[in-house]
Amino acid sequence: MNEPLFGYKPSKVARLLRVRTSTQALADARTTGSTPYDRWLKLSATTHATFDP
């Protein structure tokens, strides 16, 4: 199963797809506001009286 696919090896194709899906997941998380940074912003916004970064 090491046949080149459009000149790419299957492992390279799998890696490209994995990178694509991870960036897409990050973009989706960003739009929904569920990245760790967005959660931290919400947390710091709710506790800004006691927590000052």
Image (spheres, rainbow, N blue to C red):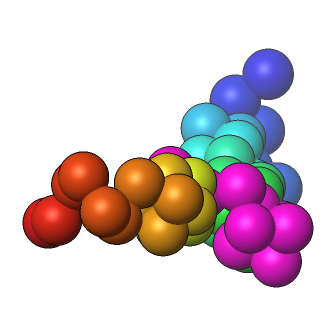
Q: In this view, does 29 lie to the left or right of 16?
A: right
Name the spot of residue 3 as percent of width and height, x first: 77, 38
Name the spot of residue 46 as percent of width and height, x first: 53, 59
Q: Which residue is drawn at 79% across and 22% down?
A: 1
Residue 44 shows in the view: yes
Image vertical order of residue 44 relative to residue 31, above or below: above
When asked about the image quadrant of residue 21, the answer is bottom right
Q: In this view, does 46 lie to the left or right of 25?
A: left
Name the spot of residue 15 as percent of width and height, x first: 60, 47
Q: Is residue 31 left or right of residue 51?
A: right
Q: What stretch is highlighted in magenta?
A: 28-37
Residue reaching furthest front?
Answer: 49
When asked about the image quadrant of residue 34, the answer is bottom right
Task: Looking at the picture, tell me which residue is in the foreground, 3 or 41.
Answer: 41
Task: Looking at the picture, tell me which residue is in the foreground, 35 or 23.
Answer: 35
Task: Looking at the picture, tell me which residue is in the foreground, 46 or 41.
Answer: 46
Residue 9 shows in the view: no
When asked about the image quadrant of residue 32, the answer is bottom right
Whether residue 24 appears in magenta in the rendering, the answer is no
Name the spot of residue 47 as percent of width and height, x first: 41, 54
